[in-house]
Amino acid sequence: MKVFGERKRAVAVLAAAGALLALAACTPGQGATSASSPSASTAAATSEASTTAPPSPSAQPGTSATVGALVAGFPEQLLPVMPSAKVESSSFDKTRTPATVALVGKITLPAAGVVAYYSKQLEDQGFKPVPGEAVGSVVSKDFLRGDNETVNLAVVETAGVSTFTIGANVAAESVK
């Protein structure tokens, strides 16, 4: 069994988070295209070469994701962007129950500072921290409100820069 180093594990965690954000914008079974269609092949090649993907034709109204900014309608009152943080990507799906919200950001601050900021923000909204502070070498903190609203915060710190992913599954009325 090969043992991953901390950097490879961090990259794997961030890649998984990015994949989840991308999947949040698609509905099951609708994101696939036929490789036999010339227009599908051309569209796939074009979108791979582009740094900004066009809106997904398979996305339902109320479902969106974007890179480098907050997606339109992002519920900042639920998951505020940490002051001085750079938004890497965000997603928001209010078409499902529970609604899902995700944010990936970077900041020049230790991981403990990111956890402290979001812990205060979430606890002020009635979320309770769940025991546990890490998954392997990745700082990870879970929060629960009521019986079915959850938030997870994961932070990877490299060379003084913390990359954080925060995702929430909450009642629809929590994102209005």
Image (cartoon, grey):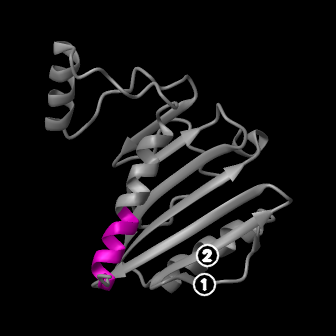
Q: Nearer the viewer, residue 36 or 47?
A: 36
Q: Is residue 50 magenta?
A: no
Location of residue 141 (image quadrant): bottom right
Q: What is the residue that sits farthest to the right in this orientation?
A: 146
Gap in angstroms between the C-alphas marked 1 and 2? 5 Å
Residue range corresponding to the magenta coloring: 4-14
Q: Is residue 8 magenta?
A: yes
Residue 114 coordinates in the image, percent (x, y): 51, 76
- For the point 51% across and 32% down, the residue is 28
Q: Amino acid at mark 1?
A: Glu
Residue 98 coordinates in the image, percent (x, y): 72, 43
Instruction: Determine contact: label 1, label 2, CB under 8 Å.
Output: yes
Residue 172 coordinates in the image, percent (x, y): 74, 39
- Relative to residue 48, is residue 79 depicted above or below? below
In terms of secondary structure, where does tag 1 sit? Answer: loop
Q: Magenta part mainly helix, strand or loop?
A: helix
Q: Which mark is residue 141?
A: 2
Q: Quadrant of the N terminus?
A: bottom left
Q: How many marks?
A: 2
Q: Residues within 10 Å of mark 2 (few under 14, many from 20)?
A: many
